[in-house]
Image: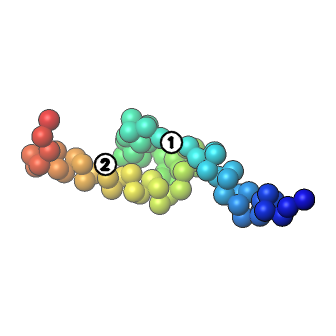
Amino acid sequence: MSNSKKKTPEKFVKDIRNNTQRIFTAEQKILIVMEALRAETSVAELCRKYSISQSQFNKWNKEFLEAGKKRLSGDVKR
């Protein structure tokens, strides 16, 4: 038997993460950010609800606000 076919524990975990990675659509990201802007629940609760990290949420929030600023200032063409 060859040892080259055995997976290391790190490779095994990496493969699982790659195969279970979720992809959020733009609409889903917008809905999550808008839900936070309504301030009915905390950001921490929203992150737990949608199983995302707070850093991921903060990135989406920043992108959302930057896109809004660009659109309102007329920098974006339709």
Residue at position x 72%, y 64% from top? 10
Q: Split into 4 quadrants, where in the image is the C terminus?
A: top left
Residue 31 seen in the current view: no
Render colour scheme: rainbow
Q: Quadrant of residue 27?
A: top left
Query: Which numbered tag is attached to residue 64?
Result: 2
**Residue 41 vertical placement versus 25 (above, below):** below
Residue at position x 67%, y 53% from top? 15
| Residue type at numbered disc 2 | Phe
Residue 37 seen in the current view: yes
Percent of width and height locating residue 77: 12, 40
Percent of width and height locating residue 48: 58, 49
Who is closer to the viewer here, 50 or 76?
Answer: 76
Query: Which numbered tag is attached to residue 6?
Result: none
Query: Which numbered tag is attached to residue 23?
Result: 1
| Residue type at numbered disc 1 | Ile
**Residue 75 vertical placement versus 55 (above, below):** above
Percent of width and height locating residue 59: 39, 57
In whole angstroms, how far apart are the C-alphas of marks 2 and 1?
Answer: 17 Å
Residue at position x 74%, y 57% from top? 12
Q: Is residue 14 left or right of residue 61?
A: right
Percent of width and height locating residue 2: 85, 61
